[in-house]
Amino acid sequence: MNLFIICFVLAALLYVLTLPFVGKRAKKAHTEEMPIRGYSERFPWEEDRIAYNRKHGLPDDAI
């Protein structure tokens, strides 16, 4: 029984250690480049308000 527990723990540890190299996320991370974020001229809360204003037909500066 002790041998079974040791083998199971070693198999689980090996599985966890190999996930970053073989898993689905590893393949995805190596094939795609990370997008570079373009920073806005405004603050994020202003962006939300401007989007709301445009959606409802208001001018951008009607915050």
Image: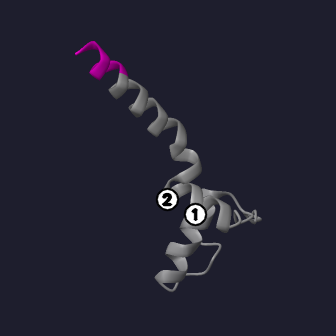
Q: Residues within 10 Å of mark 1 (few under 14, many from 20)?
A: few
Alpha carbon of mark 2 to alpha carbon of mark 1: how far? 6 Å
| Quarter occupied by the N terminus | top left
Secondary structure at numbered mark 2? helix
Q: Amino acid at mark 1?
A: Lys
x 40%, y 33%: residue: 11
x 31%, y 17%: residue: 3
Say above or below: 15 vs 27.
above
- Tell which of 15 and 20 is nearer to you: 15
Q: Quadrant of residue 46?
A: bottom right
Left or right: residue 11 compared with residue 25: left
| Magenta span contains residue 12 | no
* Place of residue 43 in the rendered image (x, y in percent of width and height, measured from the top left): 68, 57
Q: Which residue is mark 1?
A: 28
Q: Which residue is mark 2?
A: 24
- Tell which of 41 and 20 is nearer to you: 20
Residue at the left extreme of this rendering:
1
Q: Residues within 10 Å of mark 2 (few under 14, many from 20)?
A: few
Residue at the top extreme of this rendering:
2
x 75%, y 62%: residue: 39
Left or right: residue 1 compared with residue 9: left
Q: Is the C-beta separation of discs 2 and 1 under 8 Å? A: yes
Q: Quadrant of residue 41?
A: bottom right
Which residues are the magenta region? 1-6
Say above or below: 44 vs 8.
below
- Majority secondary structure of magenta residues: helix
* Place of residue 47 in the rendered image (x, y in percent of width and height, measured from the top left): 61, 66
Q: Amino acid at mark 2?
A: Lys
- Tell which of 61 and 5 is nearer to you: 5
Say above or below: 29 vs 51.
above
Secondary structure at numbered mark 1? helix
* Place of residue 13 in the rendered image (x, y in percent of width and height, measured from the top left): 45, 30
